[in-house]
Image: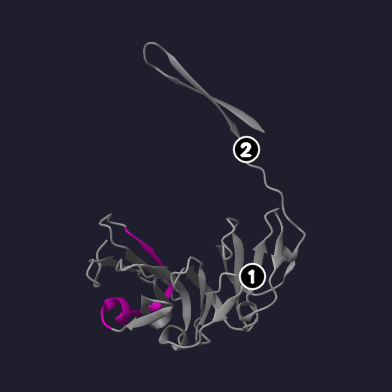
Amino acid sequence: MKITVVLAILLSPLIIFQSEIFSQQFIKITSGDIVNDGAYSEGAYWIDFNTDGYPDLFVTNIVNQNNLLYQNNKDGTFTKINTGNIVNDGGFSYGGCFGDFNGDGYDDVYVINGGSNSPSVKFYYQNNGNSTFTKISTGSFVTDISGAWGSSSVDYDKDGNLDIFVANFNTTNYLYKGIGNSTFLKITTGNLVTDIGPSITPVWCDYDNDGNSDLFVANSNFSSGQANFLYKNLGDGNFLKITSG
């Protein structure tokens, strides 16, 4: 369907702008593993893990089901990846975050497990650059047990290394400062990691445009309203909790 829109500006002389707007059409895809795999999925993420310029799909599943990874074939179809820990570690995976955590130019995968009923460790898969991943099992960022619901990565201190924030349900949240080469230092002081709430989803954004990434944390107790958290990044490794508004 094509709609022609005519806009007239009442100035002298009269100027008329005409543009054609085409309605967007979608076709439901019904073939391929990507739309026929049955799973208890909680999260889905586009990630170009092989850096070929086409987004691949990673899906996190709970109730000890394996997570899913589909490689983009560049022709509108996807190939399901069946080998490697990244698709064979069963867990209660509620989501994850992604980024080049070791600085080799390839995005790595960090998966949070747990939720409110199944506290668990995390999964971290380092991208080898050849469409395979190596699972890293050491370090507090993967061995800490919590009921994690969400995570988000950002370089909050602008040192060139990505950091990870993990939102936990009804316990303190976690902040892991990246120190390079897929290693992290757990931050244990400051309101960012001492406030307790039913935290579900974190998101970083420089909301006040001062050049520092601030943090918003969405909370929910599943039965009634719950105040969310907003932390202003002061630029020196500390955060100011915003309590008004």
Q: Position of residue 157 (x, y in %)?
A: 29, 69
**For the point 26% across and 66% down, which residue is it?**
233
The image quarter containing residue 141 is bottom left
- What is the crowding at mark 1: few (fewer than 14 residues within 10 Å), some, or many (at least 20)? many
Rendered residue at 60%/56% (across/down): 54
Taking the magenta stretch, the answer to whether it contains residue 138 is: no
- In the picture, the disc for residue 23 is 2
Residue 205 lies left or right of residue 127; in this view the side is left
Front position in the image: 21 or 161: 161
Residue 150: mark in rendering: none
Q: Which residues are magenta?
A: 189-206
Disc 2 packing (10 Å; few <14; some 14–19; many ≥20): few
Q: Amino acid at mark 1?
A: Leu
What colouring does the structure picture have? Answer: one colour
Q: Which dot, 1 or 2, sits closer to the camera?
A: 1
Pointer 1 residue: 69
Examine the image and state in which quarter residue 235 appears: bottom left
The residue positioned farthest toward the top in the image shown: 13
Residue 156 locus on image (x, y percent): 32, 68
Which residue shows up at 37% across the image and 15% down it? 11
Element at label 1? strand
Label 1 with label 2: CB-CB less than 8 Å: no
The quadrant where residue 170 appears: bottom left
N-terminal label among 1 and 2: 2
As shown in the figure, which amino acid type bears the numbered disc 2?
Answer: Ser
